[in-house]
Image (tube, helix red, strand yellow):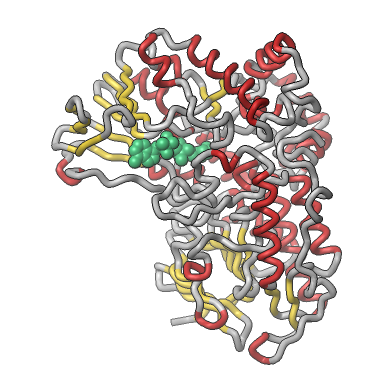
Amino acid sequence: MTMNEVDVIVVGAGFGGLRALHALRQLGKRVQVIEASDDVGGVWYANGYPGARCDVESYDYSYSFSPELEQEWVWSERYATQPEILRYIRHVVERFGLRQHIRFECRMERAEYDEAAARWRITCSDGSQWSAQHLVMAVGQLSAPKAPTYPGQELYAGQIIHSALWPKEPVDFAGKRVAIIGTGSSGMQMTPVIARQAAHLTVFQRTPNYSVPASNAPVSPEEDRLVKAHYRQRREQAWNSPTGLGFLPGKKSALEATPEEREQVYEAAWHRLGYGFALTYFDILLNKQANDTAAEFIRRKIASVIDKPELRDKLVPRDHAFAARRPSVDSGYFQAFNRDNVELADVRESPIVEFTEQGIRTTPKSHAFDLIIFATGFDAFTGSLLKPEIISRGGRSLREKWAAGPVTQLGVGTHGFPNFFVLVGPGSPSLLSNVMVSIEEQSDWFARMMVDMDRLGVVEAEVTEAAEQAWVAHVNARAQETLYPTANSFYNGAEVPGKPRVFMPYSGGVRGYRRLLHKCADSGYLGFELRDKPLAQGGQAVNAGAGVAHVAPPQGEAEPALPQAA
Ligand code: NA7
C-alpha cells in the first residue's frame, strides 16, 4: 500500500476545512483534505431538511478573506436557506480551485503519531494511507447525529429519517402522516414547512424552546449595495463584537431600564434582531433578573400567536433561562400549531412507550405515521472528534485522554498530541458565536504557526500540560460569569446520557479570544513547546513561550464576559 506524503491532512470539507485548506495553500503547504461524504459542505450538505437555514445573517455567515468574493456573491435573503448556502460553498470551491485537493467518500479511521519521524500516519476507509507533518481536525461541532432507540423500533413499517442525514432526493410529504421528534432549531425550522404539505403532523416535544422570529426577508439590490459599500466596517464590527454578529450589544443593564423602556427596546429587537435579541441589554446572559425580563417578554410574545389556549402552557418555555441553551430563530413555528393538521405530543406528560408497526405508542394513545423524523440533535463538540482512533505519543488515544471531558490549550491543541490542530472545537467560542469568525481566525493562525515552525527549524509543536490546565480553568471561570451553566444543554454535555458534564465552548467572546490567540503567537507561542527535533530524539523547546502556561489574563482583567458590550 502506497503511503501518500503531504504537509497537512485536513479532515472535513465543510466551511472550516475549506477555509483551512485555502489558508494553508496560500502559504505553499501541500494539503490533502479527506471527506467522508461525496461532496463539500459538511453539515450544510447533510442537513437538507425542509426549512433549514442559517440563524446568522448571510452577510456575516460567509468568508471574509476575499473582498472580490464578498462583492461578487449576491445573497437572496437575510438568512440564507441551506440550498443557497450550499451553492455559495460550491462557488467558493470552484472559484479558488479547492476541489482538486479533496478526496471524497474517504473517512479517516485512524491517525497515529510516529514519534521518531514526527509525522502523523493516517489510515482511511477507502484503504488509502497518508503521512503528514500536521493533522487538522475540521469535523464540525454539531456533526455527529444522535437519536434515541425505542422499543419496537425495528417493527415500524414506515420511513425514519434523521434531520442531519437527510436524503438527497426530495421527500414527498403530500397526503402523509408525519411525526417530528425534537424541538430544537431543526424541529422548529421544519415544522411550519412540513405542516403546509403533509396531511397530518405530530410534533413530539420534550423541552419547550425559546425562539425569536427570524424576520427573514429578501435582500433588495439597494440593501446589497449598501452592505457591500461598507463591508469592511461590518466585518470589523463583527470581529470586535463578543458574538461575531454584525452588531454590538447594548451598553445598558436590563435592570436599569424602566419597564416601559424595556418593552420598547424588546419590541423593536423582536422584529429585527433574531438571535441578537439576547444582546439588547448586556446582562441578559449574565444576570438572572435581567434575563427574566427578556424571558417574560418572549413568553408573552409566543403565547400571543398561539390560538389554542390549551397549547399555550405547553409550548411556552419556562424551565431554563432565555439563551442559556441555544434558542431558535424561527419562521412561523408557533403559528403552525394553529393549523388543524398539526398536533403537539408532550413527551414529558405522555412519554413514548414504543414504536409499533404503524407508528408510535405513547401512554395515552397510538399514533399512525407514514414517516417519522428524528430531529434529536447531535453528540456535540466531541462526537465527531472522538469517532476515529487518534493515537499519540505513548500510544494514548484521544478518547482515553478526554474521557473526563476535552482538555485543550486555547481550543486548538492538546498535550501529548504534537502537530495536531482542532478547528472551532471545545475551548473555542464556536457555538456561542458566529462560528465563521473563529473558523477564519483559527485557520489563519494554524497557517501562521506552521510557517513560523518552518522558519524556526521546528519539527514538532505540542501543548504543555500546564497550559491546557490553565485554559480549561479559564474557560470554566468565564462560563461561571454567565447563565449558561444553569441549563442542561449541549454546551455542557447534558445532551448525551453519561457524557462528561463539562462546559465546552469559550464564553469570553470572539474579540477576547482573537486577542489571546495573537498574544500567544506574538509572545513565542505561549503554552506550546516548539521543538527542533522530535521529543523522542531529545528535542528541546526553542520558543520563548514554552514555559508560560497562562495565556489567559488573570481574573478581573479579562475581556468582559459574553455578551457584554465592547
Ligand atoms: P438540538 O438543538 O440539540 O435539539 C434536539 C431536540 O431533540 C431537542 O428538542 C431535544 O429535547 C430533542 N430530543 C433529543 N432526544 C430526545 C428524546 N430521546 N426524546 C424526545 N426528544 C428528544 O438539535 P437541533 O438539530 O434541533 O439543533 C442543532 C442546531 O442548532 C444546529 O443545526 C444549528 O442550527 C443550531 P431536549 O431539549 O433535550 O429535551
From the top left corner, tell me how far across and down residue 489 is, in percent.
Answer: 50, 42
From the top left corner, tell me how far across and down residue 501 is, in percent.
Answer: 50, 52
Asked whether residue 97 appears in the rendered view, the answer is no
Question: Residue at horizontal 72%, vertical 44%?
Answer: 509
Left or right: residue 124 compared with residue 90: left
Camera-side residue of 529 and 470 = 470
From the top left corner, tell me how far across and down residue 497 is, in percent.
Answer: 39, 50
Left or right: residue 136 compared with residue 255: left
Camera-side residue of 286 and 160 = 286
Question: Residue at horizontal 76%, vertical 85%?
Answer: 540
Considering only vertical position in the picture, is 97 above or below 388? above
Asked whether residue 161 appears in the rendered view, the answer is yes
Considering only vertical position in the picture, is 68 above or below 321? below
Ligand 1's image quarter is top left
Name the quadrant containing residue 415.
bottom right
Left or right: residue 332 compared with residue 408: left
Name the quadrant containing residue 37.
bottom left
Left or right: residue 50 compared with residue 248: left
Camera-side residue of 48 and 472 = 472
Query: Looking at the image, which residue sits at the far bottom?
Result: 537
From the top left corner, tell me how far across and down residue 281 is, in percent.
Answer: 73, 26
Considering only vertical position in the picture, is 304 above or below 100? above
Question: Residue at horizontal 71%, vertical 24%?
Answer: 280
Question: Residue at horizontal 44%, vertical 46%?
Answer: 495
**Which quadrant is home to the C terminus?**
top right
